[in-house]
Amino acid sequence: MKTPRSSLPVSAAACLVLFSGCALFGSGNKDKSVAQWQQDSKTTISEGTPEAEAELRKDLVRERERLQGVLETHLTRAELSDDVILGTATFNDSYEADTFENQIGLLKKFDVVPEMDTPQNRDRGKFYKPTSDESKARLAKLYKKKKLLDEIRVALANTSAVGMFLVAEQRDTIRLNWSTELYCLQFGAQIRAFEQQFETEASSETLEEMAQVMAIRDQTRGLMVTHVGLLAAFEGVAGGGQPSAVTQLARASKAHINAPAAVEVKQARAYIEALQENGFDLGASLEASMRDAVGDEDYERHYQRQLTRTIKAVEKAEAEQSLYEQVDDAARLSKRKELKEQANTVQQRLTERAEQLAGAKAKSVISNLPFGRQALAGLRAVKELRAGNPRGALEAAIEAAPAGPIKAGMQTAATIGFAAADGGKRRRGRR
């Protein structure tokens, strides 16, 4: 992840004031001269505030546009998977498009729906477990019905392809959401640094850019939990639930897919305020929560390095003194040396703090942020699916999903996608 600038520019005029101020110390009226130099320095730096904020906003705009481009790629891919499920497109041009409901219905009719592989094996490219001996025996009885066998093979191939596509998109959107979460953290800290350095508040234009970056983050979370929900519903259907659970959720996803998330300027301001001297603990809480969701090995391979870079930038921004004080403070060079040494221990300190905050404390830190509860619910959905609990994953995804068609579609899928399992429990209860 490219680190946006955290050092805000001081105009050339400020440097002139600094050097002219040094000459004043040799005058006979030292106290008066120093006071005048300090005042002139503050005035000159204050005049540079618009320039500094423009640079900060330029970084925000550039990163927002880049993230929006990446998000649109995944939105296009999500729309394709929805179309394949709904039978209006296909991954393989040699096969005729058909609805997921029809194809899984055919497999159910002849009792040859394969068992889904473990989440870990799905990550390795194996969506279904090998065909069971019972299914092989059932298929053997159909050996004279070549057309039907071909249709069954196509249904198996197509439903597996849908599943693997969803697995890949879920993985990629988890990482995209992580990146956008960290960009929000970093830019929020930079805006705080700007405000402290120039003793002012960021303009509404800057806060609007921050709100748009947060909206992209929330839209990527919605996309992530939609993939989790579809995979969870798929697993429920494979276990005997109604196939329409997946198609109805895909229809809801398609209706919602391009709806942008809405974040208000006041929510961006609240997020920035919540970061005041709290960026490190938020980073450690994110580490603890992501480790819990994806496991230590996956976290350290795919997520740790990016968080470490982000927290280095956040700590640097949080430790910046006011530029007015920097002009007046001869100890600033010593402070910068201290910060450089501190940056070398970020990863170790993050992991130690994450262990201290693991569980309820980490959740408390994150949930106090705007949209923090939805972020936690999204990670819980990922964790439950990984743990082999599709119903729990879908319930968490519902909590994380934005209001509207996608949340309603998930609620419907949760009701009908596990109907067979619920019926089995009721029957066992009557015995």
Image (cartoon, helix red, strand yellow):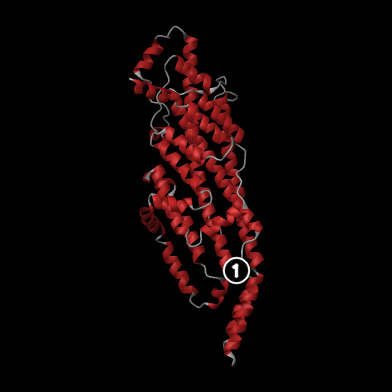
Against 358, residue 102 (above or below) is: above
Front residue of this view, candidates 210 and 13: 210
Q: Position of residue 48 (x, y in %)?
A: 65, 69
Helix, strand or loop status at disc 1 = helix
> Would you say residue 72 is visible in this rendering?
yes
- The structure residue drawn at horizontal position 43% and vertical position 29%, both measured from the top left corner, is 127
Q: Farthest residue to the bottom: give it.
A: 28
Q: Position of residue 29 (x, y in %)?
A: 59, 91
Query: Residue 30 lies in what quarter of the image?
Result: bottom right
Q: As drawn, which residue projects farthest toward the front? A: 430
* 348 sits to left or right of 62: left
Mark 1 burial class by Cα count in 10 Å: few <14, some 14-19, many 20+: many
The location of residue 107, given as percent across then percent down, is: 46, 18
Q: Quadrant of residue 192 in the image?
A: bottom right
The image position of residue 245, as x and y in percent, is 51, 26
The kind of residue tagged 1 is: Phe
The residue carrying mark 1 is: 198
Quadrant where the C terminus is found in the figure: top left
Q: Is residue 206 above or below residue 77?
A: below
Q: Is residue 164 visible?
A: no
Rendered position, 78 above or below 323: above
Quadrant in which residue 86 is drawn:
top right
Q: Is residue 176 left or right of residue 386?
A: right
What is the count of numbered marks? Answer: 1
Q: Say which residue appears at 65% left-offset and 74% top-offset.
A: 44
Nearer the observer, 396 or 293: 396
